Amino acid sequence: SEDDYELTVVVSPTSPPTDPPSPSPSDGPSPSPSDPPSPSPSDPPSPLPSDAPSPSPTVPEQCMVNVDMTCVDDDGTDCDDIPTPEKQCDTSDVITFTYTAETCDESFNSQDDTCEDIGTGPSDSATIECKDSSFIVLPVNMVTVGDRVTLLLRESSAADLISCEIKNTDDTVEQTLVIDTTALNLKDTFGSIQLERCDKQSCFIPITYTYNITNIGDTPMEVTTVMRTRGTSMVDLIGIVEDRNVEVGESTVAREIKELDVCVNVDEETRIRVEADPPQGIPCFSEDDYEL
């Protein structure tokens, strides 16, 4: 038998035509790259406030002093350059001795002098009484060791030879001397007296030590000490400083007058130390020396 086969075609209903889908919106075209716009001109920014500069460190005022020492005679000659006088006396109208209280054993002269000690010899304190060859008494002198005795022989008509008595305080004669005044030399020693001067010839020359004190710092100062050392002697000369308060750049001075024995070799150092105080801060000092 022949099989029957039925084909059934089912057709779906046709949909009405539709518009094609609208394209989805898209971004606009990208702009072509370009330089960024120039900023509009503006005032420069104000600088930030800065800290005030640190003050430089303050240098404290400093006390500085300088002392300068000089030594001259009355003619302005440096003490080291003062000449030694001729020792042989040309004339002897005025003669000066220093009292030493030494015995006759210490006599040293070119004369055939007469010297006699009585008892233990002269005392530290004495009376010197001299007479000329006519026994005219010359002025009497009361002395202690180191004192000077001046005899005015021109007032005597017979003073070529003088005799002297050295008495103690009880008026007891302790030494007798006979001196030829026509043959004298400076530094002649007759027992307890030594010749220092015959008229204008003299062993002792007045000299002046000058201590110039200058403020070389940058603050006023007050001089507090002016210590002078000579040998074993130490003396503060603050009492003779002309002005103790010294301004910056100014000076003050102290002067010391003494005598120099130019008839003997001198090896003597003088040292000066000056100290000063400022109103504030550290004191200062200066030293100088002078050697004869």
Image: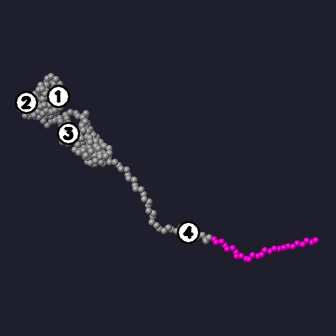
* Circle 3 SS class: strand
Estimate the spatial distance between the alpha carbons at disc 1 and disc 4, rounded to whole Å.
125 Å
Could you say which quadrant of the image residue 98 lies in?
top left
Counting residues from the N terminus, which is met first, the one under dot 1 or under dot 3? 1
The kind of residue tagged 3 is Ile
**Other residues around mark 4 within 10 Å, as few (<14) / some (14–19) / many (≥20):** few
The kind of residue tagged 1 is Asp
Estimate the spatial distance between the alpha carbons at disc 4 and disc 3, rounded to whole Å.
104 Å
What label sits on residue 124 in the rendered view?
1
What label sits on residue 257 in the rendered view?
3
Estimate the spatial distance between the alpha carbons at disc 2 and disc 3, rounded to whole Å.
35 Å
Residue 176 shows up from this direction: no
Which residue is drawn at the image coordinates 29% and 45% (left, top)?
278
Disc 2 designates what residue? 137
* Circle 2 SS class: loop
**Other residues around mark 2 within 10 Å, as few (<14) / some (14–19) / many (≥20):** some
What label sits on residue 106 in the rendered view?
none
Q: Which residue is at the front of the view, 73 or 65? A: 65
Counting residues from the N terminus, which is met first, the one under dot 2 or under dot 3? 2
The kind of residue tagged 2 is Val
The kind of residue tagged 4 is Ser
**Other residues around mark 3 within 10 Å, as few (<14) / some (14–19) / many (≥20):** few
Counting residues from the N terminus, which is met first, the one under dot 4 or under dot 3? 4
Q: Which residue lies furthest to the bottom in this view?
A: 16
Disc 4 designates what residue? 34
Please tell me whether residue 219 belongs to the stretch shown in magenta. Answer: no
Which residue is drawn at the image coordinates 7% and 34% (left, top)?
155
Which residue is drawn at the image coordinates 77% and 75% (left, top)?
13
**Over which residues does the magenta segment extend?**
1-26
Estimate the spatial distance between the alpha carbons at disc 4 and disc 2, rounded to whole Å.
138 Å
User: Which quadrant, please, contains the N terminus?
Assistant: bottom right
Which residue is drawn at the image coordinates 45% and 66% (left, top)?
43
